[in-house]
Image: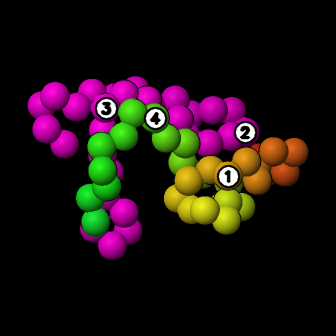
């Protein structure tokens, strides 16, 4: 991340992590992404397009007891 990158992270209740701003990220293999303005990262583990949310969490979110 360089000095010009700023972003905001919002944890959506029963949904993904929403990141908005100007940012890039590294994947699990260490590859740096292109610069993004907005992304939704899956927190439920059901997405078929990980690490991104594909909406599969809807009506299926399970809160640990
Ligand atoms: S949080 Fe949306 S598919 Fe996992």
For the residues marked 3 and 4, what is the alpha-carbon distance in whole angstroms?
8 Å
Mark toward the start of the polypeptide (1 vs 3): 3
Q: Quadrant of residue 1?
A: top left
Q: Earlier in the sequence, mark 2 or mark 3?
A: 2
Total tally of numbered discs in the picture: 4
Sequence-wise first label, 4 or 1: 4
Q: Quote the CA–CA distance across marks 2 and 3.
A: 25 Å
Q: Quadrant of residue 22?
A: top left
Give the crowd class for mark 1: few <14, some 14-19, many >=20 residues within 10 Å.
some
**Magenta span contains residue 31:** no
Q: Which residue is mark 3?
A: 22
Give the residue at mark 4: 38
Ligand 1 within 8 A of label 4's CB?
no
Mark 3 vs ligand 1: CB under 8 Å? no
Question: Residue 14, labelled with which disc?
Answer: 2
Span colored in magenta: 1-30
- Farthest residue to the left: give it: 3
Identity of the residue furthest to the right in this view: 59
Q: Position of residue 28 (x, y in %)?
A: 38, 68
Which one is earlier in the sequence, the residue at label 3 or at label 4? 3
């Amino acid at each position: 991340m360089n000095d010009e990158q700023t972003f905001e992270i919002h944890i959506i209740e029963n949904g993904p992590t929403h990141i908005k701003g100007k940012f890039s990220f590294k994947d699990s293999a260490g590859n740096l992404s292109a610069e993004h303005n907005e992304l939704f990262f899956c927190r439920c583990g059901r997405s078929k397009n990980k690490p991104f949310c594909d909406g599969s969490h809807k009506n299926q979110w399970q809160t640990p007891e």
